[in-house]
Structure formats: C-alpha cells, structure tokens
Amino acid sequence: MSLVNFTTREITCKIVYYGPGRSGKTTNLHYIYGRVPDSRRGRMVSLATQTDRTLFFDFLPIDLGQISGFSTRFQLYTVPGQVYYNATRRLVLQGADGVVFVGDSQARQLDENLESLQNLQSNLLEHGVDIRTIPLVLQYNKQDLPRELILSPADLDDALNFRGVPSFSADALHGTGVFETLKGISELVLKKLAAGTAA
Amino acid sequence: MSSVLNPKYSFATFVVGAANRLAVTAGHTVAESPGAAYNPLFIYSGSGLGKTHLLMAVGHAAKKAAPQLNIEYLTLDEYVEAFHASVAAGQGDAFRRRFQNVDVLLVDDVQFLTNRKEMQSELLRLTEALQAAGRQIVLTSDRPPPDIADLDERLISRLSGGLVVDMGTPDYETRVAILRRKAEERGARFEPGVLETVAQAEVGNVRELMGALNRLVAFQAVNDTSINAETVKQILGLTGEGAAAATPGAGRASAAKAGGGDEFGEFLADVTVTVGKAVEAWRARVGEAVLRWEGEGYRTHRLEALLQRDAPGAVDQAIAAFAEDVERLKALEAEVSDLDPAAAGQSVFRDPERLGEAEQAAAKIREGAAPPPGPSAAFPLAAFAVGPSNQVAVSAARAALERPGKKYNPLVLVGKSGLGKTHLLNAIGLELARGKRAVVACLSTQAFIDELIAAIDGNHVDWWRARYRRATALLLDDIQLLTGKERTQEELFNLFNLLQDKDRQLVFTAPAHPNTLSGLEERIVSRLEGGLVAELKEPDREVKRAVLERMLGQQGVHPEPALIDYLADRPTDSVRSLVGLLQRVVGAAAAQDGPLSAGLAREVLEGQAPRDTRRSSGFRTSGLVVSSLGGIKSREKVVWDWIDVADRMIEEFR
C-alpha cells in the first residue's frame, strides 16, 4: 500500500487499533467519530454482536482535506480482540501503516495485554512486518477506573512498553487521551512516510 | 547561492502605515535611482515586520525600472556560504568580482555579522567598491548598525553613512489593512468585525498576525461555519476577562463545545505540520546536500534541479549518485594533483555534471605522465665486478638500496670515464625498480635535458615535471652535462628538493667531485655534497680479473689463466680500456683463427709482430711499441716513413 502518492497527490494512512478484547478500541473510534465534522468523516462501519462486541472490524474513514497540496485520508480500523478471531485480526492488519495498541489498564488484564501484544507481533510477522519497524504507540485505557483496580502508566510502561514507543494514558469513554493517541500515531506514520519516500 | 526574489514580495503587496512609511519611501527612491540617493540604505526592524518583503520589493521595482540592472538578493548567511565556497574552491577573487558587478545588492539579516571578522572586512571592502562604482546597496538587520555586537567601527560608519531607517510595529489601521489584504489573497471571507477583532489583539509583528489569520482560515474550513467576532476571541484565546466572568456557565459550555471541535482541529493542524515537514522533508535533504557540496566547492546544478520538481522521485538515490560522482571527482583530482598539481585546479574536477570530461582530462594527464625512462636491463648489479678500487661506492650503493632515500641521499658516484659509474647507476636503478609501485627514472643527463627542451617546445612542461615527480627514485648519469644548462638546473633543483622531501632515492654520476665541476650552480653542488660522494678508482687487479673472466665467459671462451693474468697485470686506467685490450686480442685471435693465449696477447699488445705478419713487407717502422697504453695513442702520430739519411744530411748542410 502506497502511503504517499505523489502523482495523484494523495496521502492515505491506515491505522489499526489493536488490543485485547474489551480494552476500548471501538470506544476510541466512536469518540473520534463524534468529534469529526460530518463533512469530514465517512460512515463508520461497525460489525458488532448483540452484546456490542466487535465481530469483524470497525472502520472509520476520515478525510483531512488538502494538506500541503495532498488530499489526505486516514482510515481507522479496529480488530476484534477475542482470541478466536485471529484470522480476522490478521486480515485487518494487512497493509497497516501504523498500529495503536489499546491496552486495558486493569491489573487483572495484564496477561491479556501481553498475550495480545505477542499476537500482534506474530500477526505482523505473518505479513512480513517487523514490529520494531512499524509505527506503534501504546494507549493505556481506562485510567479513569479506581486506582486500586488499575496499574499506573509507569507500571504499564514497565510491563508492556519494552520497545520504548510513545505511550498515552487514556479514558476513551470520555475522550481523554484519544486524540493525543491519534496524533501520536499520525506523527510516527507521517514521519516514516518521509523516510519511506527516501528509500 | 543567491536567492531568487519572491514575486509575492513587491511594493504592491506591501501595506504601508505610519510605522514603515519612511522606510518604504526610501525604498522607492532607491529603486528608482539606484546608487544616487541613499547609499547604503540600511533598514532595521524587529522580526516579522517586513524587512525581507521591503528588500525584495526594492529589487523588483529596480528591475522593473531598469531591466538591464544586475540585481542580487541574498541573506548574509548565503553571502557567507558563497564566500566560503569560493574560498574553498580557491576562487576568492571570482567571488569578489561577482559581487562587484552587481548594480543593486540586497543583503538580508546583516546582524549575523557578529563575530565574523573576516566577513566584516569582506563586506566593508565590497561596500566601498560598490559605493565607489555608484552601485546601490540595501541592507536589513534587526537592529541599527551600532547595536550589532562586535561590528567593525569602519563598517558601522560605512553602513550608517547612507540612510538608516527603522520600521516599527504596525498600528491598528495598518494591521486591519494587512489582515484584509491577506484574507483576500487567501480567498477567505469573514463576517464584518472579525478582522478588526483580530487586529485589536496585541501582536508583536506581522507574522503573528498572519498566524492568527491562518488559524481562523483553518477553523472556518474545518468547521464549515463562518466565524463571528465573538468566536474569534475564543479561537484566538482573546477572551476578555469581563465576558468570561459575566456568563461563566455559558462560557464553559461554549468552550467545551469549541474544545470538542478543536480536538479535531488541533489534530488537523498537527497533521498539517507533520505532513508539511515529512512530505517536504526530501526538499530539506536536497537543500542540505546542495549546501554541503557547494560548501566544498562543487557545482550542484543537478541537485538544484531536483528542487524544481514536485515529487521526490528517488531523491536519495540522486543525492547518493551525486555524492558518488563527487567522490570519483575527488579521487581523480587527487590522482591528477599527484601527477600535475597545476591541472588539479581545473573546474572540470568540481562539476559532477562533467564527470566524463574529468575522466578524460585525468586520462590525458595520466598518459602525459607516462613513466619516465627507466634503468637499462643490460647492467645488472650481479654483473658488476667488485674490488678494493670500487668497494666504497658499491657498499654505499648497497646501503642505499637497503633503505632507499634514507641512508645516502643523494648518492653521487664519481670517477673517471670507463670505471663503471653508468653500470653501477643502472644496477642501482634496476634494484630499486624491483620495489612495489616503484617508478625509477634512470637516464643520462643529456636525455634529461633533451626531454625538457622537447617539453618546453611542446608547451607541456607541467606534464614533463609530473612524470618526474611521480618517480620514486631519480638516477642521472653524467651530471656534469648540466653545465651551463640553467633551466635544466633550475628544474632539477626543484625536482631534487621535492623528491628528497619525500625520501626518494637520488643517485648521480659525475667524472669528478661535484665541487670541482665548473658551471654547476652552487645550490646544486651543495645539495649533491649533502649526500655521499663515493669515488670509483682505477680498477685494481681483482676487478680486472673479474671483468675479464666475465667477458670471456660471456663469449663462451675459457682462456688459459696466463692470459687473464697477463691482461690483468697490464696497466689500464679504466675498465673500458681493459675491455678494449681484450677485444683487440680476441679480434686478433679471430683473424688468425688461433687460440686465445697470453702469447698472442703479448704479440698484439706489445707490438711484437707475429711471425708472418701481413703488414711487415715494404714498411719501415720506427720500432716504437705502438700501444694504446703508451704515450702514443694514435697510429696516425707515428712516423712510418723516415726520409733517407743522405737526403737528410743534404738538407742540414744547406
């Protein structure tokens, strides 16, 4: 997938929100959807089960308009977090320009986080992508929960962020940290784009 | 590198207000009659108040008034870079000439002269030259000349000598006018009162004003709603205390709402900045490369052409290819400068576009610098007969061979003709030539002189020099031939010094000690004496025997020892005359078809006529021993026919 097309002057970024089930990926997208002016966003496609679990994936296209003469589009995807939807996850991950790993800050979810992170790594590898080279940020969601239930961002950094990527604490439900995360990943993706055109 | 005048920055687009009217008027005057009114014109103001705009406007207006004028706009940094680049390329004079031919010189940001003494004096010189030639200079700075730290007094007085004028912060009306004009340029429409509200804000300069306007334009584009005077304050954070205090609840609500919208707006702004940086990053890389190579004195047309393109299309390959070409040029230049320092400065070695030409030029020079004549293979060291008479010279030669250029440098072999100097010289040359990458120049001084004359004649003395400068050793036979050849002595002197500096072995031969040779310059003599002068004496018996044995051995003859002894014992003053003797004997033996023997030699050399000599009949000889060794060397001097005694007496009695 070509990120920057200099001929048609288009920039297209595919960003995938990844993470364990119920960590708040879809919530992130919903919040963003709510903040993007109508004219800028496409229809948010959400395939969910009756219990509101993402069945296939969520898709939110955002049109940022002309930036530096490039018509710029962001495509935000989420993957289903449940372990048994791995084929879907792998499919959604294909051609991703950047990944937001949405972790669940709850202490009891730490293992799920780790497992999902490993799953991300192996799925990327299936596509021939090294997790060390793809733009990646971590979001520690649900930081609004009572202190005793959650791990602090510092602890989560220790536990999950062994590659030292940018990390953001968030409360996706209320929107805290959602756009910071999106900005963070966009910056990485676009910077890589600069390096990408270098090659 | 000088910048191109930005077409947007003209007087037409410059908003004139009370704060900058004087500067603009001065600019107009200068543009209409460059060099006539205020020279130099020095404009200073804070950042973002239109210095660059005004400066370029002067350039445009001057060009419009008189299209033939040579107008140059550049920032001080560019001036400094251009200066460094030309100095690096060894073309400082070209740099000065370039700027002295400018009719209107526009220099931006001269405050960066601080701590640049060299540039200050350069600028002073340029200012004086341009003023003297009636050419216009306009300079801008963020402070008046005396406030520029560390500025040369002469330059201060020179810069203050014309008109120094400042531009202040635009007043409210000017700000509104600027905003209106800019909004119009962008095609942005605002509700009445919006721009006025923006203009009311306290801004330090026009750039900040533009920043505020940009935010409004972006906000309006994103939200697809038009902004009114009230929302402007919120967007720009200008909310008056009173308004916020009066309706705190409403304020918060609208702030939250605005904040909600803003979240995406901020994100958009963020992405815009990043895209600008990232997508255009290749331009920055190309720019860096241009600066870098230009700084090193290379022409960068190819890279500059890249900047004209819209898409990056493999710029990094292009930069890498450029760097590769430059490396190649460097290698060629280094090679060429080794061969011919004069040729290395050619501009072709500084222009990657002309790499092909550079290759050709280098090849030509390489060809021109074909190795100088080497030693003759006919004189191997092994064949050199050693004895007490030449022991000193041979040991010196061996010592020099062990550590070429370090032990005896130069080594001067002196001795009469025919003692083997040339042989030893060539033998040393052959030994030296065995070394890796050895380039041994070994030739007679006459050939050396002839080559120089041919080079002068063919106008390629540089190539000739280059050939010898490459040599790892220089061996010249018969140095006395330099007598009276002043130019050759001069060249040799230089070559001598150059080679000796590089520890390259020098060997010369001469018939006598250098200080006894007339016609040699003192400096050459003293240099020759500075090494080791080793003498070859008349051959001793040992040497002679060795020579005889070798020569006869070469001819496949095994003579009786008595012959060798006889010949070796004969008084000969040189190896060459010994060889002459031997050849006479060998010749006689061949004529008689007889064996080589001591007897035959005695007959031939001592004049005892062989029993049936063909020459005896009818001749009266004086009975003198005709020998090449005696006082009589030539048969022509021998009186063969004496007049009759009777005749002689009659003569005497007359």
Image (tube, coloured by chain):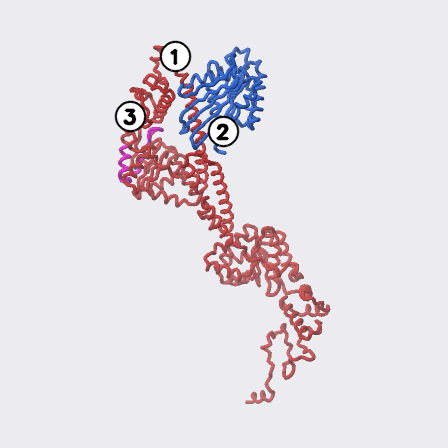
Chain colours: A blue, B red
Q: Are marks 1 and 2 on the same chain?
A: no
Chain to which the residue tagged by mark 1 belongs? B
Q: Residue at x 68, y 68 (%)?
A: B568
Amino acid of disc 2 = Met
Nearer mark to the viewer, of 2 and 3: 2
* Image position, residue B593 (x, y; %): 69, 74
User: What secondary structure is marked by label 1?
Assistant: helix
Q: For this rendering, which residue is in front, B263 or B584? A: B263
Q: Label 1, on which residue?
A: B253
* Image position, residue B128 (x, y; %): 33, 42
Nearer mark to the viewer, of 1 and 2: 2
Amino acid of disc 1 = Ala
Chain to which the residue tagged by mark 2 belongs? A
Categorize mark 2 by other alpha carbons within 10 Å: few (<14), some (14-19), many (20+). few
- Relative placement, left or right, of B413 versus A96 is right
- Relative placement, left or right, of B36 versus A80 is left
Image quadrant where one finds the N terminus of chain B = top left
As for residue B504 lying within the magenta part, the answer is no
State if disc 2 and disc 1 touch (CB < 8 Å).
no
Picture quarter containing residue B536? bottom right
Magenta-colored span: B24-50
Q: Label 3, on which residue?
A: B177
Q: Of the two numbered discs 3 and 1 on the same chain, state the one appearing first in sequence.
A: 3
- Measure the alpha-carbon separation of dots 2 and 3: 47 Å
Chain to which the residue tagged by mark 3 belongs? B
Using the image, tell me which numbered label, if any, was put on residue A1: 2
User: What secondary structure is marked by label 2?
Assistant: loop
Q: Are marks 3 and 1 on the same chain?
A: yes
- Numbered disc total: 3
Above or below A132: residue B373: below
* Image position, residue B390 (x, y; %): 64, 61
